[in-house]
Image (spheres, rainbow, N blue to C red):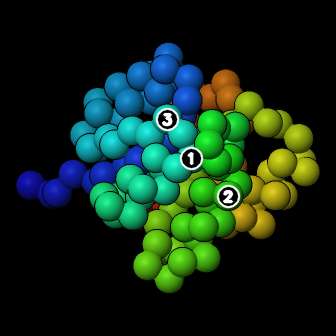
Amino acid sequence: MREKKKILVVEDEPDILKTIKMSLEMEDFEVIEATDGMEALNQARQQHPDLIILDLMLPKMDGYKVCSMLKFDKKYMHIPIVVLTAKAQEKDEKLAKKSGADVYLTKPVTPDKVIQQINKLLK
């Protein structure tokens, strides 16, 4: 039996968080949650997740900052980051990619599409 992959989901909307968490658990992923940027950073550093799903508009510290702080740190730069956001403008996507995001998805998105991206990144 393979070890469960650990995914950190960073989302401040409780309903969206619950939906993502449920669909990931159905795919047999272990889910860690964070609801603000500071908590996301702490969780990533303590838990060493295999992948992070990150919202951009977060309390305490935005997703761009969380993303770059992890991606520009040798200890965490290998962790793939999937940005999942309501920000659909090209400039937002460019900034997210510059911050180190591996994938940029805009809400609303189907859980299947999220899972598909995760599986691609965790190969």
User: Picture quarter containing residue 21?
Assistant: top left
Q: Is residue 13 visible?
A: yes
In the rendered image, the quadrant that contains the N terminus is bottom left
- Dot 3 or dot 2: first in sequence order is 3
Q: Position of residue 41 (x, y in %)?
A: 49, 56
Residue at (49% x, 35% y) in the render:
35
Q: Which mark is residue 37?
A: 1
Q: In this view, does 48 lie above or below 119?
A: below
Does residue 112 appear anywhere in the picture? no
Mark-to-mark CA distance, 3 and 1:
7 Å
Mark 1 surroundings within 10 Å by alpha-carbon count, few (fewer than 14), some (14 through 19), many (20 or more):
many
Disc 2 is placed on an element classified as helix
Q: How many marks overall? A: 3
Check disc 2 and report the residue beneath it: 65
Q: Position of residue 36 (x, y in %)?
A: 54, 39
Residue in view at x 64 percent, y 38 percent: 58
Give 119 or 42, whichever is nearer the viewer.
42
Q: Disc 2 or 1, which lies upstream in sequence? A: 1
Identify the element where label 1 is drawn: helix
| Amino acid found under the numbered disc labelled 2 | Lys
Image check: 8 left or right of 105?
left
Res 113 label? none
